Image (cartoon, grey):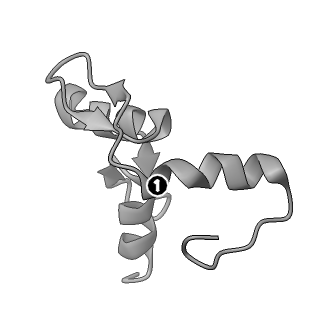
Amino acid sequence: PECGKRFCTHAHLLQHQPTHTEKRPFCCPNCGKGFKCNSTVVTHWCLHTGERSHDCPECRKNFSRSSHLIQHQRRH
């Protein structure tokens, strides 16, 4: 392994391996920016659309990324 990480399945290893290349085959249809995995394109797309689908149940503030919601919730 290049980075020392171990995976339970070969499929997970194959999913991880592209992080070690410079290839960015998944492109944003709006701006053309390239990404290593499609899920990152989906997250990036929210920057263009303004979509904020992660809502705080306590104060109703919303976020484009779940990680930002989690950080916010720690402040309550």
Q: Where is residue 14 in the image (x, y as percent from the top left)?
A: 68, 47
Q: In the displayed image of the protein, which residue is found farthest to the top?
A: 29
Label 1 crowd (10 A; few <14 / some 14-19 / many >=20): few
Q: In the displayed image of the protein, which residue is found farthest to the left?
A: 31
- Which sits in the foreground, 22 or 55? 22
State the residue at coordinates (56%, 70%). Answer: 2
> On the picture, is 16 further left or further right than 74?
right
Q: Position of residue 24 (x, y in %)?
A: 34, 36
Disc 1 secondary structure class:
helix
- Which sits in the foreground, 53 or 30? 30
- Which sits in the foreground, 42 or 60? 42
Q: In the displayed image of the protein, which residue is found farthest to the right?
A: 8
State the residue at coordinates (36%, 39%). Answer: 23
Q: Where is residue 69 in the image (x, y as percent from the top left)?
A: 41, 62
Q: Is residue 59 above or below residue 33?
A: below
State the residue at coordinates (85%, 64%). Answer: 8
- Which sits in the foreground, 67 or 33? 33
Q: Quadrant of residue 60?
A: bottom left
> On the picture, is 8 further left or further right than 48?
right
Q: In the displayed image of the protein, which residue is found farthest to the bottom?
A: 75
Q: In which quarter of the image is residue 66?
A: bottom left
State the residue at coordinates (27%, 25%). Answer: 28
Q: In which quarter of the image is the C terminus?
A: bottom left
> On the picture, is 30 further left or further right than 62?
left
Q: Mark 1 points at which residue?
A: 19
Q: Where is residue 47 in the image (x, y as percent from the top left)?
A: 21, 37
Q: In which quarter of the image is the N terminus?
A: bottom right
Q: How many labels does the image show?
A: 1
Q: What residue type is labelled 1?
A: Thr
